[in-house]
Image: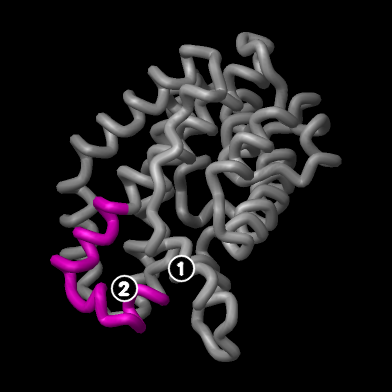
């Protein structure tokens, strides 16, 4: 296990394209649902326990699949990710981010398992799990990276969208620490069952609606 690799993979400056996406925050801000640090924290909490949990479980399962420890492959995991992403706009974004992450991870940790993903155009959480394996990380660490990513990106976006105090935003993220650990643990436990049907499928209908609305905007700061 490499703590340095985990820190790099979870770093918002890792060139995987995440900085260009708000994770639904831009649409939530425009709708007036997120307008200060408190409402941002509520948004992040909801995102963590829905799409964050689902992504974390897919990432942990992909790490197991990459190492041959699971009875399914990347293609089945990709179908499971598709089934858990009802918004066409979000599916497209997830696959685009997957391609960008694959490029960055292949440069950082070249590995045959990443080469196998190149033709699939897989969802971002699946690529994240494979990248974690290539970097020498565990399924639990992959889940932790995915859970953190589900809140860090939108939080950073809120600084730009609302001009929030970065210190307050960092404090809110720190306050989510115990919940991040719990979600990563729940996701890892689900992945260890080696049954795709048992992976979390927590839904966030408003995020799906926001994604479709945001996709139709002609002027926007973030790609999603």
Label 1 neighbour load within 10 Å: few <14, some 14-19, many 20+: some
Find the distance from the CA under tag 2 to the CA under tag 1. Answer: 23 Å
The answer to whether 18 is drawn above or below residue 130 in the figure is below
Between 16 and 182, the one nearer to me in the picture:
182
* Vertical side of 159 occupied by 4: above or below: above
Indicate yes or no whether the magenta region holds residue 32: yes
Residue 3: horizontal and vertical position, in percent?
A: 43, 27
Label 2 crowding class (10 Å Cα cut-off): few <14, some 14-19, many 20+?
some
Percent across and percent down for residue 170 are 23, 57
Q: Quarter-wise, where is residue 165 in the image?
A: bottom left
The numbered dot on residue 141 is: none
- Number of the label disc, if any, that sits on residue 159: 2
Circle 1 SS class: helix
**Sequence-wise, which precedes: disc 2 or disc 1?**
2
Residue depicted at 46% across the width and 43% down the height: 10
x and y, in percent, of residue 59 in the image: 53, 32
| In front of the other: 156 or 11 | 156
Residue 152 occupies quadrant: bottom left
For the stretch drawn in magenta, the main secondary structure is helix
In the figure, is residue 34 to the left or right of 207?
A: left
Q: Which residues are magenta?
A: 27-46
The percent position of residue 153, horizontal first and vertical second, equals: 41, 59
Q: Residue at x 25, y 51 (%)?
A: 45
State the residue lying farthest toward the right.
119
Residue 88, compared with residue 35, is above or below; it is above
Kindly report which numbered mark, 2 or 1, lies closer to the viewer in this rendering: 1
Q: Which residue is mark 1?
A: 209
Q: Report whether residue 100 is seen.
A: yes
State left or right for residue 84 relative to residue 187: right
């Amino acid at each position: 296990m490499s703590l340095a690799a985990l820190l790099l993979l979870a770093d918002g400056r890792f060139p995987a394209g995440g900085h260009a996406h708000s994770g639904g925050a831009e649409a939530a801000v425009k709708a007036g649902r997120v307008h200060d640090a408190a409402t941002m924290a509520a948004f992040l909490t909801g995102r963590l326990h829905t799409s964050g949990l689902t992504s974390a479980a897919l990432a942990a399962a992909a790490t197991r699949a990459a190492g041959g420890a699971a009875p399914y492959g990347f293609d089945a995991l990709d179908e499971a990710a598709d089934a858990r992403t009802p918004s066409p706009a979000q599916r497209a974004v997830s696959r685009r981010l997957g391609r960008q992450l694959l490029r960055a991870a292949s440069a950082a940790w070249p590995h045959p398992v990443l080469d196998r993903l190149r033709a699939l155009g897989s969802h971002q959480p699946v690529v994240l799990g494979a990248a974690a394996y290539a970097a020498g990380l565990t399924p639990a660490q992959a889940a932790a990276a995915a859970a953190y990513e589900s809140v860090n990106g939108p939080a950073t976006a809120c600084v730009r969208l609302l001009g929030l105090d970065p210190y307050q935003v960092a404090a809110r993220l720190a306050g989510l620490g115990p919940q991040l650990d719990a979600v990563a643990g729940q996701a890892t436990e689900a992945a260890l069952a080696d049954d795709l049907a048992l992976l979390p499928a927590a839904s966030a209908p408003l995020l799906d609606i926001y994604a479709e609305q945001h996709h139709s905007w002609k002027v926007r700061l973030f790609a999603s």
